[in-house]
Image (cartoon, rainbow, N blue to C red):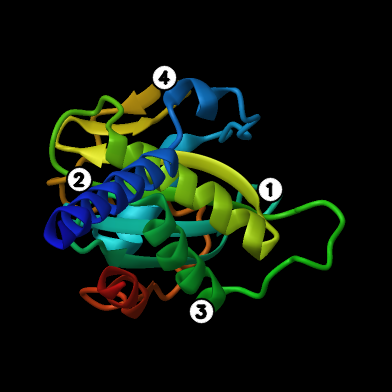
Amino acid sequence: MTFGFASSSAASLSTSASAASASRLLEPAEWASAGIPLLRNPREVVSGLHARHEPKPLTAIVAVLDPDERLRASASFTRRPTPADGWMFRNALLAQLRRVIPHDLRRRTPVRTAVLLYCREGEARWTEEDGAWMWGLRDACTLHGLRCGAYITLTHDGWQVLGEGRGGRRPNAHSAPEPFATSEAPPLVPRTGGPVSEVLRRAAAR
């Protein structure tokens, strides 16, 4: 009898954990209705981040833009190949933001905007992993006093701003970085979180 009760409890806990994880993602319709500000020149943002960080699949780049869409800070890190979870992604993004730029929590209204570019394998269409990144970005922005900006995927087919329908073939997940435009300011020194961020390791251990 005791063994049967324990098994039932374990199954219940497992189901609850799966349900909680599933709730920590945003569907495309939810993202589209969230009032995410549009990038004026998404290709320029994507090309700049790609040239600075040279992402490979499983690399996430979080960047902070000022109201004029100039890059103020950026950081990249490699996602650990574990099941997608918005809470885990939120913690990793927040840790990177805290490393590279002060929070804006004292402001009544956010001025700076955080965008996320995620390089991955597979097709460009939305996946549950993308939904978890969207949830994580939105929550991390709230906790750091930033506006939640665009979520961009970089795949073999090119880049795409999810929820907007804008994209291009270059750069892509396997292309060489393009040279910086002569009109751009000198590139910022990229900040990296190592092969696997400490936050992801701690979160996975839980």
In this view, the residue in front, 4 or 182, is: 4
Choose mark 2 or mark 1, whichever is in front: 2
Circle 4 residue: 165
Comes first in the chain, label 4 or label 1:
1
State the SS at label 2. loop
Crowd around label 3: few <14 · some 14–19 · many ≥20 (10 Å): some
Choose mark 3 or mark 1, whichever is in front: 3
Circle 2 residue: 120
- Cα distance in 3D space between marks 2 and 3: 24 Å
Which amino acid, mark 1? Asp
Comes first in the chain, label 4 or label 2:
2
How many marks can you see? 4
- Cα distance in 3D space between marks 4 and 1: 22 Å
Circle 3 residue: 99
State the SS at label 3. helix
Q: Which mark is residue 68?
A: 1
- Cα distance in 3D space between marks 4 and 2: 18 Å
The quarter in which the N terminus is drawn is bottom left
Residue 205 in the figure: left or right of residue 187: left
Choose mark 4 or mark 1, whichever is in front: 4
Q: Are marks 4 and 2 in contact (CB under 8 Å)?
A: no
Q: Are marks 3 and 1 in contact (CB under 8 Å)?
A: no
Q: Are marks 2 and 1 in contact (CB under 8 Å)?
A: no
Task: Residue at 87% x, 56% y: name it.
Answer: 108
In this view, the residue in front, 124 or 7, is: 7
Q: Position of residue 64 (x, y in %)?
A: 56, 58
